[in-house]
Amino acid sequence: ETGVTQSPTHLIKTRGQQVTLRCSSQSGHNTVSWYQQALGQGPQFIFQYYREEENGRGNFPPRFSGLQFPNYSSELNVNALELDDSALYLCASSVLAGGGETQYFGPGTRLLVL
Amino acid sequence: GENVEQHPSTLSVQEGDSAVIKCTYSDSASNYFPWYKQELGKGPQLIIDIRSNVGEKKDQRIAVTLNKTAKHFSLHITETQPEDSAVYFCAADNNNDMRFGAGTRLTVKP
C-alpha cells in the first residue's frame, strides 16, 4: 500500500455534467500529480500541484482543473463531461526535489460517462 | 515533448523463465526512469527505478538497464513466478513531466 487514497472508487455521469474526484496524499508529500488512464493505455499526465499552485500541465483542455489544499489533499474537477473522458483517473503523490521524484499512486477512480 | 515507446505489448513466459521489456524515449533531457506494475483494479505500483547517472540497477529478481546514448532502457525479470503476471509500464521523467509507455501485459504460465 502506498498510503495514497482516492474517492470515489467508481462514478457514473452523463455527458455535459461536472465531476469532482478526490485524492489524499501520502503523509509528508507536498506534491500531487493527476493522470488519466484510458483502457489498455498508459497513464497520461494531466497536471501537477505543488504547495497549492499548478506546477506543470499536460495536453488537457481547461475544463480539467484542480485544487490542492493546505493539508496536501487534492481535487480534480472536470466540467462539461464528454464520452471520451471515461477512464481511470489516478493521483500520485511525491516530495518535490527538483525533478525525478518517485511518485506513489493511489488505486484510482473509474469514471464512466454515458 | 517526450515520447515513450514500449515493446512488446504482450509477453507470455513459462514459470522460471526470464522476461525482458524494452522502452525507448525521445527527450535526451529525461533523467528519471521508473517501472510500474499494475494489477487488475489497482493503481500502478513502483517496482524499480533508475536515474540518468546510473547504467544498471538490481533488486533481487528485477533489474533495469539504461543506455542514455541510445535512449533506451529495459526491465529484466528473472525466475518469473505466476504472481509476476500483470501489466508493466515504463516511464521517462523530465522535470516532473512524466510520460508513460503503453504497457506490456506479462503472463507467467505455471
Image (cartoon, grey):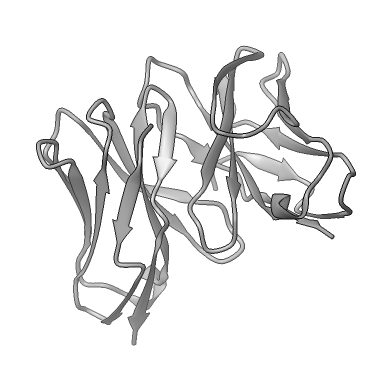
Location of the C terminus of chain A (image quadrant): bottom right
Residue B58 appears in the figure: no
Which residue is at the front of the view, B83 or A47? A47
Which residue is at the front of the view, B93 or A92? B93
B41 above or below B72? below
Q: Residue at x 38, y 51 (%)?
A: B101
Q: Residue at x 70, y 35 (%)?
A: A23
Looking at the image, residue A56 sits to the left or right of residue B94; the answer is right
B95 above or below A19? above
How many badges with numbers are in the image? 0
Residue A93 x, y percent position in the rendering: 55, 31
Residue B71 appears in the figure: yes
Residue A86 x, y percent position in the rendering: 72, 55
Which residue is at the front of the view, A39 or A2? A39
Residue B88 x, y percent position in the rendering: 39, 59
Q: Choose top left, top right, bottom left or bottom right for residue B40.
A: bottom right
The residue sitting at the bottom extreme is B110
A111 above or below A91? below
Q: Residue at x 14, y 36 (%)?
A: B68
Residue B55 x, y percent position in the rendering: 11, 39
Looking at the image, residue B99 sits to the left or right of residue A2; the answer is left
Q: Residue at x 19, y 77 (%)?
A: B17
